[in-house]
Amino acid sequence: MKKAIIIFIEIALLWTVLQTSFVQHLLNDTQSDVSDWLADVTGFFDSRSLAGLRQNIAPFTESLDEPQRAYLEDVTNDLQKLQNFNNLYCKGDDKNPFVYGETLQILCAQIASSEVLRRS
């Protein structure tokens, strides 16, 4: 019975301490730091995957004009832009003014064979 009372008092004391503004602030900061760290780790792996995709498509884009290469560089620098490109031009019927024909087919095949969009 004495142990139960001591445990109850310890739990009540812990609950009281955890309700203080200092501890709440500390826990919020810790959560924010961990969230930022996880976002950085995810961004690092996404960047590596996108860089690998850029290397894979480089031989096919050498013959393109500078605006076309700049467009593809922009698309393959951001995972969200790549997903939009894939949905609109590879899976959808939308027409792309920069990349079309055989180049678009090769690019879509490279995107499909890469691991970039499978992880997201």
Image (spheres, rainbow, N blue to C red):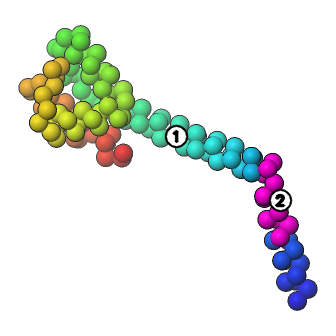
Q: Position of residue 58 (x, y in %)?
A: 25, 22
Quarter occupied by residue 36: top right
Identify the magenta region: 12-23
Q: Where is residue 42 in the image (x, y as percent from the top left)?
A: 47, 41
2 vs 1, front mark = 2
Residue at coordinates 68% horizontally, 47% vertically from top-left?
28
Q: Is residue 103 visible?
A: no
Q: Mark 1 points at which residue?
A: 39
Question: What amino acid is found at the position of numbered circle 1 in the picture?
Answer: Ala
Label 1: element kind: helix
Residue nearest the viewer, comparing 96 with 49: 96
* Residue 14 within the magenta-colored segment of the rendering: yes
* Magenta segment includes 58: no
Residue type beneath disc 2: Val
Q: Is the magenta stretch mostly helix, strand or loop?
A: helix
Front residue (pair 92, 106)? 92
The residue that label 2 is drawn on is 17
Question: Regarding mark 2 in the picture, which secondary structure is present there?
Answer: helix
Against 69, residue 100 (above or below) is below
Neighbourhood count class around disc 2 (C-alpha, 10 Å): few under 14, some 14–19, many 20 upward: few
